[in-house]
Amino acid sequence: MTRNKDLYKNFKSQDEFSDRLVFFLIHLAFFFKVYKKDENTKVLQDIYDFIFRQLELSIREIGYGDQSINKKMKNYLNLFHSLVDKIHYWNDLEVNKKTEIFDTFIENSSNNQFLTEYFNNYYNILKNNTLNSYLKSVVKA
């Protein structure tokens, strides 16, 4: 879903790795918000560990050194946890508050109204599907 070209329309600067990563982390935060239940705890922890391990490997492939990787990973983890915190009460927020969240986390975008609508729809899609529907044929039972 982070490859949706509409997400990157009206960017003030060039689309970069960090921009795409922010969108990925926003999608992931919504995913965790919807499926965070006691019965999903182990699966979600495995997903979380896998994703951030792969993110670290991707940063290494780009060519950053160990110190830079640690700093970037800390920043990305803090960003993710901040996103999770901000969208925790997504349903209770007014539209302008939702848009402010994107103003905070996506510096290069001028289409935050579209993003608010997009993530409202994404949230509803997640709510109407089960976690297992996303994991089918991905995780061995």
Image (cartoon, rainbow, N blue to C red):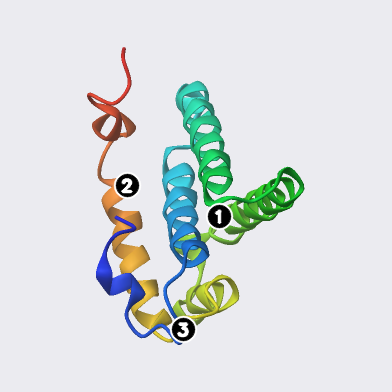
SS for dot 2: helix
Tag on residue 88? 1
Does residue 114 appear to the left or right of 33 in the view shown? Answer: left
Does residue 18 appear to the left or right of 132 in the view shown? Answer: right
Residue type at mark 2: give it.
Lys
Return the x and y of residue 110 as percentages of the image width and height. Answer: 43, 86
Seen from the viewer's position, the closer of residues 128 and 137 is 137
Q: CA distance from mark 3 to mark 2?
A: 33 Å
Q: Residues within 10 Å of mark 2 (few under 14, many from 20)?
A: some
Q: Which residue is mark 2?
A: 127
Q: Earlier in the sequence, mark 3 or mark 2?
A: 3
> In which quarter of the view is residue 138 placed?
top left
Residue type at mark 1: give it.
His
Q: Which residue is mark 3?
A: 13
Position of the C terminus, as image quadrant, is top left
Q: Which residue is drawn at the image coordinates 26% and 69% (left, top)? A: 5
Q: Earlier in the sequence, mark 1 or mark 3?
A: 3
Q: Which residue is drawn at the image coordinates 55% and 55% (left, top)? A: 88
Residue type at mark 3: give it.
Ser
Seen from the viewer's position, the closer of residues 138 and 128 is 138
